[in-house]
Amino acid sequence: MDHAHLPLECITEPTEPETSRALISNSMGRWRTMIGRRVLARLAISSVAPSLEITHLDVLDAVRRAAPGGEVTVGTIAEMMRIDPSRASRIVGEMVTRGALRREASQADARRIIVVMTELGQQLMAKIQAVKRDVIETVLTEWPEEDVAAFAHLFDRFVTSFEQVCSTRDKDTA
């Protein structure tokens, strides 16, 4: 096992489960730094739409992820992004001005306004996703396909479980 990224306390004869958990924790710290810097999103923006900001992509992604569940409101977007509804409304307004989103009256309740992705927004998201997939493909290029498949399944399972734990703890502290 390559211990180059492990802190010293993690490589002084811990049991195998402790080593695995320490490695996960250490890797998550390195990953958090890259995610915090929004490395992948910045690469995608610079390749596809340099005039956009990361929050613009976040709003588009929130609409894309929430849409299958029903109508998307600014409140839905704010909740998904964990930002104030007035900030979400401003960002949505910017994306409406750019033509990537539009506001419509709800079919279920005409008094309610929903947010819908336009064709331009869908094209933009498709291009952004393609750049991200290309970066991931470059990272995985030398991995055997069975490792990629196992990692995809296990990483999704880990993130799903992590979301569930965090959601439960958020509800417990509320």
Image (cartoon, grey):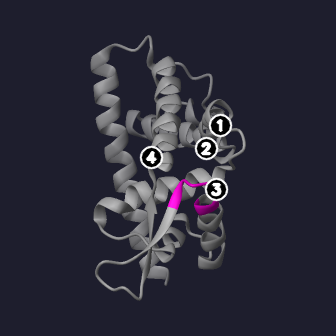
Helix, strand or loop under label 3: helix
Q: Which residue range is magenta in the image?
A: 96-101
The one of 141 and 121 positioned closer to us in this rendering: 121
- The correct choice, above or below, for 169 with respect to 131 in the image is below
Per the image, the residue denoted by label 3 is 55
**How far is the residue under mark 2 from the one under mark 3?**
14 Å
Instruction: Say which label, 2 or 3, has the lower sequence index.
Output: 2
Per the image, the residue denoted by label 4 is 122
Q: Position of residue 167 (x, y in %)?
A: 41, 69
Q: Residue at x 48, y 53 (%)?
A: 61
- Using a 10 Å C-alpha cutoff, classify the residue at mark 1 as few (fewer than 14 neighbours), some (14 to 19) or many (20 or more): few
Per the image, the residue denoted by label 2 is 35
Helix, strand or loop under label 1: helix
Point out the frontmost of discs 4 and 3.
4
Instruction: Say which label, 3 or 1, has the lower sequence index.
Output: 1
Per the image, the residue denoted by label 1 is 39
**How far is the residue under mark 2 from the one under mark 1?**
6 Å
**How far is the residue under mark 4 from the one under mark 2?**
23 Å
- Using a 10 Å C-alpha cutoff, classify the residue at mark 2 as few (fewer than 14 neighbours), some (14 to 19) or many (20 or more): few
**How far is the residue under mark 4 from the one under mark 3?**
16 Å
The one of 146 and 122 positioned closer to us in this rendering: 122
Instruction: Say which label, 4 or 2, has the lower sequence index.
Output: 2
Instruction: Say which label, 4 or 3, has the lower sequence index.
Output: 3
**Does the magenta run of residues contain 100?**
yes
Instruction: Say which label, 4 or 1, has the lower sequence index.
Output: 1
Amino acid beneath label 3: Thr
Q: Residue at x 50, y 47 (%)?
A: 120
- Seen as rendered, the residue at the extreme right is 51
Q: Residue at x 59, y 77 (%)?
A: 85
Amino acid beneath label 2: Ile
Q: Is residue 121 left or right of residue 50?
A: left
